[in-house]
Image (spheres, grey):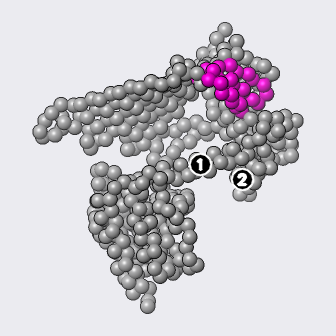
């Protein structure tokens, strides 16, 4: 069977799967809250995410790749050929040859290609409520019977993609793994890195932006430079870092460092780097023994996307010269559904007096409907706890900030200062600038 005949033969089998997808999209309930189908996994790859069965027989392939870029706007493209080509080029998804011309099947733009012993099906899956946005998928299959054997999991996987839940599942999975590692690398206070083993702590600053967002935020990275010539991207008190376990579980966080002769610069080289890179930032200062602060330090993080999701979080630490502290966290988020004229806002404030949450929704759609009507606004507010976890006593010593909260909980944070004036404090590598100093 030649390549063209193979494509045509496999394409007919894929049409059955696409017919199932159309039925799922229109009639199936939302994917179960647990996430992936039993026996499936998801991981980041090639600028997106791959969903695939955990166990495949030798020679078998079956995976769904989801483009990690923002959704593709199809409203400007009338030609199916142009629409698919532009989407694939933008995502760098050009794998495959002997491709059939794109087709419209069950409302989806699809294209089938061959790559070695596997068949690739590219798909523009409609997303959102406007009908003009789509996400690029690539389904890869090889092996007799693989489609039939993973039929149920495949349906649920496509439904998860259609519900735009892939990234939520992936982030939750990565968060769980991150928490597991964080517990494993942490040892008892005083049992980790000794102060005498530290050559310096260097802090770098950069602007970061999440995928699909239009707002940048400032991110600090603290490099714990040890006298043995190795460095670590650190976010915990050094005296609690189990170096041996960390090197095993998170080698990507470890680097080599050097300070060229007669230079004030510090350079690092990561495990995958060929060249040395100069660190741009500042040498951090530790706290003096039993040092006291007397002022307010804060920062505000904003986020937002082209799909009208907007929000901010404001964090503030209030330190008193008598050793007391208070924390205030204020955040809000809003979503604007321009198609239905619905605006939803949620705000949350947590401080030394308690936590308050309020949600509001306004529906102006009635003003735009031919039947007329009036705008509707709904609001509710709730309050809980007495704020004891957001106040207490503090103690500074070296690279450690110790907290004793009024609710009985204790905590140790990695602390650094930018200068002797204490104009900026980093806590676990999260920065806060002084906005008010008390006399």
- Residue 340 placement, left or right of 149: left
Q: Is 34 situated above or below 192?
A: below
- In x, y percent, where is residue 165? 44, 52
Nearer the observer, 84 or 232: 232
Q: Main secondary structure of the magenta part?
A: strand
Q: Is residue 303 visible?
A: yes
Q: Which residues are magenta?
A: 390-418
Taking the spot 53% from the left edge, 61% from the top edge, the residue there is 41
Q: Residue furthest bottom?
A: 1
Vertical side of 2 occupied by 226: above or below: above
Please tell me in which quadrant of the rendered image residue 3 appears: bottom left
Q: Where in the figure is residue 400, as x and y percent of width and height?
A: 75, 29
Q: Which part of the image, by quadrant, shows the N terminus?
A: bottom left
Name the residue at 81% across, 21% down. Answer: 289
Quadrant of the image containing the C terminus: top right
Residue for badge 2: 249
- Taking the spot 48% from the left edge, 49% from the top edge, the residue there is 168
Q: Which mark is residue 276?
A: none
- Distance from Cα at disc 2 to Cα at disc 1: 14 Å
Q: Nearer the viewer, residue 62 or 295?
A: 62
């Amino acid at each position: 069977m030649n390549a063209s005949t193979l494509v045509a033969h496999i394409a007919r089998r894929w049409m059955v799967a696409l017919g199932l997808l159309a039925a799922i999209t229109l009639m199936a309930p939302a994917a179960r809250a647990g996430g992936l189908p039993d026996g499936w996994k998801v991981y980041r790859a090639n600028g997106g995410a791959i969903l695939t069965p955990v166990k495949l027989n030798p020679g078998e392939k079956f995976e769904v790749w989801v483009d990690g870029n923002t959704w593709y706007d199809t409203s400007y493209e009338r030609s199916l050929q142009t629409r698919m080509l532009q989407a694939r080029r933008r995502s760098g998804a050009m794998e495959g040859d002997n491709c059939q011309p794109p087709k419209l099947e069950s409302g989806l733009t699809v294209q089938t290609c061959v790559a070695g012993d596997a068949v690739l099906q590219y798909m523009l899956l409609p997303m959102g409520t406007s009908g003009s946005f789509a996400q690029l998928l690539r389904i890869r299959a090889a092996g007799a019977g693989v489609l039939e054997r993973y039929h149920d999991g495949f349906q649920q996987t496509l439904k998860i993609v259609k519900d735009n839940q892939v990234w939520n599942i992936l982030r939750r999975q990565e968060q769980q793994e991150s928490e597991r590692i964080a517990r494993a690398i942490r040892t008892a206070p005083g049992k980790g890195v000794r102060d005498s083993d530290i050559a310096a702590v260097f802090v770098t600053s950069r602007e970061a932006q999440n995928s699909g967002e239009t707002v940048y935020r400032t991110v600090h990275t603290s490099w714990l430079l040890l006298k043995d010539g190795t460095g670590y991207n650190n976010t915990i008190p050094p005296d609690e870092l189990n170096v041996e376990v960390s090197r095993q579980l998170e080698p990507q966080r470890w680097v080599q460092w050097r300070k060229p002769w007669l230079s004030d610069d510090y350079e690092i080289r990561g495990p995958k780097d060929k060249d040395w890179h100069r660190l741009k930032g500042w040498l951090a200062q530790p706290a003096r023994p039993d040092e006291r602060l007397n002022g307010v330090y804060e920062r505000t993080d904003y986020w937002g996307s082209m799909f009208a999701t907007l929000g901010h979080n404001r964090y503030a630490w209030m330190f008193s010269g008598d050793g007391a502290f208070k924390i205030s966290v204020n955040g809000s988020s809003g979503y604007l559904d321009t198609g239905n004229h619905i605006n939803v806002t949620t705000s949350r404030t947590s401080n030394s007096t308690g936590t308050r949450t309020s949600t509001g929704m306004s529906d102006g759609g009635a003003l735009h409907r031919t039947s007329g009507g009036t705008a509707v606004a709904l609001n509710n507010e709730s309050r809980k706890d007495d704020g004891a976890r957001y106040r207490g006593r503090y103690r500074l010593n070296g690279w450690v900030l110790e907290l004793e909260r009024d609710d009985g909980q204790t905590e140790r944070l990695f602390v650094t200062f930018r200068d002797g004036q204490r104009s900026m404090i980093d806590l676990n590598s999260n920065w806060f600038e002084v906005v008010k100093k008390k006399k």
